[in-house]
Amino acid sequence: MTFFERTMLIGAAIFALGTGTSHVQAADSYPDRPIKIVVPYSPGGFTDILARQMSKQLSDKFSQPVVVENKPGAGTIIGAEAVARAKPDGYTLLMAVTTTLSSNPHLFSKLPYKISDFKPVALTGLTPFVLVANPSVPANNVRELIELAKKEPGKLSAATLGNGSSTHLVLSMLRGATGAEILDVPYKGASPALSDLVAGHVDLFFDAITTSLPHIQAGRLKPIAITSEKRSEAAPSIPTFREEGTPEMLAYSWYGLLAPAGTSDAITEKLNKAVNEALASPEIQEKFRTEGAESHPMSAKAFGELIEEHSRTWGKVIKDLNIQLD
């Protein structure tokens, strides 16, 4: 071996040792400045609410500001792309949803990000969808709604969070399962969709029960059915689609934190532990129970497996319904 070759090997070893040490030091001191959570929707929806709950919990645990930045649009693609390109240091995170990694890769042949651009951090929640209607809609259950939709095809309209969003796919599931023709009206976020639904500008919306429940309780909206296996503890009077004779309508949306690929295991494990501790707290457990969401603390690895499982489920739905957005 020449002197030059020996020098290169020694230099590479020193660099690797130094890099490993710096990663450990970075994890030990993490976080030493504010963390940003990017939400790929407008303020007001469940994803935004959940991110803000997590930001408060993490701020308390880390004694550092954790701020939420909303980047809505293009079915979470805009927000996801921003995080995919961020520095993998644990200071920019994405509050991802089912759409981001479990359905978009099946809907678009070209995305500005890849699944491998992200590293799972922690599952923050699961929620079924509740189909809510403006009180003026002359249907009070699934059977009446389908009969109405078939009697006047295209007259009923449903808000969604844009092409390829979970709400769009669940609406497509309903149309595919029942043959009902319901007009899809895309919005940039749940908050403006709910506002227009309450105002009567659209007729229906597949929403997270968390954000719809106050409107249901106040009589501003009426529930039709929920996509869970069993009735929600938060709203036990709402029947499931299965009870209503449409068992195909079983669907959940996941919410979770992702980091850019390349973020160190030590940092993601630190974040995972902090999130799971927050989810296990009596305050979060009670809030989730009363609002119809479910919390399931798990490892980052298990969260990654859940993303893949949902990807297979939604991929089959998308393929069966022949949905392609580019």
Image (tube, rainbow, N blue to C red):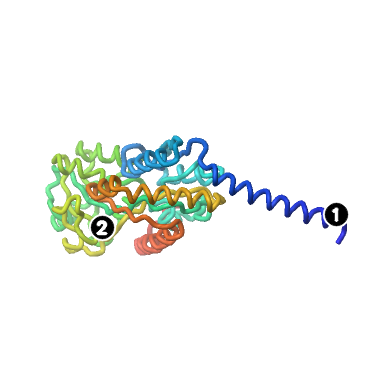
Give the residue at the far right of this rendering: 2
Q: Residues within 10 Å of mark 1 (few under 14, many from 20)?
A: few
Q: Secondary structure at mark 1?
A: helix
Measured along the vertical axis of the image, is residue 74 above or below residue 265? above
Measured along the vertical axis of the image, is residue 236 above or below residue 246? above
Q: Residues within 10 Å of mark 2 (few under 14, many from 20)?
A: some
Q: Amino acid at mark 2?
A: Leu
> In percent of the image, x 19 and y 46: which residue is there?
133
Q: Which residue is mark 1?
A: 4
In the image, 280 versus 194, the foreground residue is 280
> In percent of the image, x 68 and y 52: which residue is there?
17
Q: CA distance from mark 2 to mark 1?
A: 68 Å
Residue 112 can be seen in this image? no
Are the two marked residues, 2 and 1, in contact with CB atoms closer than 8 angstroms?
no
Q: Amino acid at mark 1?
A: Phe
Measured along the vertical axis of the image, is residue 110 above or below residue 32? below
Image location of residue 60, percent across then percent down: 40, 38
Image quarter of the N terminus? bottom right
> In percent of the image, x 40 and y 61: which residue is there?
315
**Residue 172, quarter of the rendered image:** bottom left
Q: Which residue is mark 2?
A: 174
Q: Secondary structure at mark 2?
A: helix
Q: Nearer the viewer, mark 2 or mark 1?
A: 1
Q: Earlier in the sequence, mark 2 or mark 1?
A: 1
Image location of residue 45, percent across then percent down: 31, 41
